[in-house]
Amino acid sequence: MSTRGRTRRELKLRRRLVVTGFLLAAGALVGRAIELQLHESEFLQGHGDARYLRTDQIHANRGMVLDRNGEPLAISTPTQSAWIKPADFMTERERWGELAKTLNVSVAQLETLVMPRLERQFVYLRRHLTPDEGAAIRELDLDGVGLQQEYRRFYPEGEVAGHVLGFTNVDDRGQEGIELAFEAQLRGQPGLRRVIKDRLGRVVEDVERLHPTRPGQDIVLSIDERVQYVAYRALKNAVHAERARAGSMVIVDPHSGEIIALVNQPSFNPNNRADRKVAHYRNRAVTDLFEPGSTIKPFTVAIALESGRYAPDTEIETTPGYFKVGRNTVRDVRNFGILDVAGVIEKSSNVGASKIALSLEPETLWRGLRSFGFGTLTDVVLPGETYGRLNEYANWSDIEHATLSFGYGMSVTAVQLARAYTVLANDGWLQPLSILKRDEALARERVLSAETARSVRRMLERVVVQGTAQQAAVPGYTVAGKTGTVHKSIDAGYAEHRYLSLFAGMIPAREPRLVAITVIDEPEGGEHFGGRVAAPIFASVMREATRILNIPPDALGEPAAPTVWLAGALPPGSAEEAAP
Amino acid sequence: MRLLAIAVLVGLCAFASAVELVLNRHASRKLFVELQALRDTQQQLDQEWGQLLLEQATWATHVRVEGIAREQLGMVTPAPRQVVELR
């Protein structure tokens, strides 16, 4: 190589040059560092803060709640909330008056909010502003006052579906009803991303996604909002007219177990937080227990028919209208004489039902009632559902054995009773109820032969045609049902003049499409019989529900002088009308 | 000589790559700004959609529709005997 030609001196010079160069460079760096620290630190600090790496949350929308036809029942929409940073806000003291005026509060109220929290960085001034308030605050442009996007839940139907839907709290978390039961699905997963923001908080660069956003799922209910409204209106009117304490109505599709409508009185408007009283937002149809009274008799009879020891025309002596069980007496409203099994239901004879029950083994009766789902949950996923009570048969006394046959000594919820009636309506199949729209049939269980179910339905039809429930009749349709008038139990036995009026019905009786339970708690409008109080509510709701759901009439009979009101329909008696 | 040529070539490449980097960086910023704007639009449209749904649902509440039908339009539910069933 060529190194041989170079002298040592030359090499030494080169080394010095290099070392000097490095020293100079190092000196320059140190000098620059000192200069930056001493002279430009403020500028650079500001710059560093401005261009900063932050994690940013990406909002995930809460899912909607829809009815079975896709009508929205609960929607989240953005609103703004105002916050203050007390330290900065103090610099604007002379303008507090303007802000107070915008929010419709006094300056003193602002002071009590701000003064104790001076050291805090963030205080909510007001959450969920109206759009006008938000715009006004932006207009004022005060130091230390900011707006933040938040989401608020709206319930377009207001009171009508309040108990089903429940509501969310101010942080958009479910507190009651569907909102609580399906919180996990409705609630979205907010995403997280790391970003570089500029001084004004604008995102300059998306550095990475830490967590993807997952918006909340929509929940589709089995509720038909139109039927829900009709039921709500009828129940509200009835509770008002009867001066009742409370009321509930549950309408179920017996084939799918879907709840078509579920209403309670008193109700509440979920949009209005101030309106919420605990007693009002209890979903009585699901949580409240009552003794079902005579509405149990069809099940007693069904169990008797299944046992093979009774037929619909088996005769039972009920004279003289009461009979003694041990030291207690079971009474009828009057002496019905000799009744057949169907007559026991039609006249609602306690004596008859007791005699039937006492002739059955306690275990048979207990297993039978249990198989209709009494004392078990209905699987309708609504918060607070209670089991009801059906005591184990081993401990029954004779009188307990007898009174169970007409619905005393056990307790049920309205949804439980509804499910039990779906068994009769559904030719003997028991299936769980659902508040969600079902795409496929769920596992069901046969608890009654189709023949027994039909035969009990025929008896229940007679109750409406000529028995205690004539006011449940719906023109154009066959209706089956059973009334109940229950003395309310109090601490010391039963209250003399406090009643529960019940009606359990199904329509059309031959091929039921809807089953409904109506409960009116302590009617005081002069009537208390289930047939007078609860049955008419059933009729008025079903008149409209059958039309809304397009359930064809099955008992049109001879229409007297029909008025043709369909556009394009032919006047009666014209030639075409006679054609098939 | 060849060594020099290679050095110059590498130098040029490095320069070109630096320019390319700057251009790409700029393009990425621009696209990001665009993406951000589109996301904002999407969110705004989502919100508007929610509000419109809400508005529609509010206009269509049964209380309101029924009130208009009965009071302003004088509509009634036909009595059962007025209904003719077409088979």
Image (tube, rainbow, N blue to C red):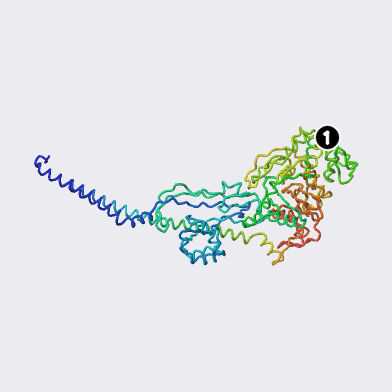
Q: Return the residue nearer the eye: A516 or A480.
A: A516
Residue position marked by numbered label 1 in the rendering: A359
Residue drawn at (53%, 49%) of the image: A188
Q: Residue furthest front?
A: A116
Residue A132 seen from this side = no
Which quarter of the image is occupied by the N terminus of chain A?
Answer: top left
Q: Return the residue nearer the eye: A338 or A268.
A: A268
Query: Residue A354's quadrant in the figure?
Result: top right
Whole-percent x, y for residue B85 in the image:
75, 56
Whole-percent x, y for residue A69 in the image:
63, 53
Compared with residue A95, is residue A559 higher up or lower down, i.e. above or below?
A: above
Compared with residue A253, is residue A136 higher up or lower down, i.e. above or below?
A: below
Q: Secondary structure at mark 1?
A: helix
Image-based side of A27 in relation to A295, left or right: left
Image-based side of A565 in relation to A120, left or right: right
- Residues packed near mark 1 inside 10 Å, few (<14), some (14 to 19) or many (20 plus): few
Image-based side of A105 in relation to A343, left or right: left
Residue A515 seen from this side = yes
Compared with residue A75, is residue A429 higher up or lower down, i.e. above or below?
A: above
**Total number of numbered labels?**
1
Circle 1 chain: A
Q: Amino acid at mark 1?
A: Ser
Which quarter of the image is occupied by the C terminus of chain A?
Answer: bottom right
Whole-percent x, y for residue A242 in the image:
77, 56
Whole-percent x, y for residue B23 in the image:
32, 55
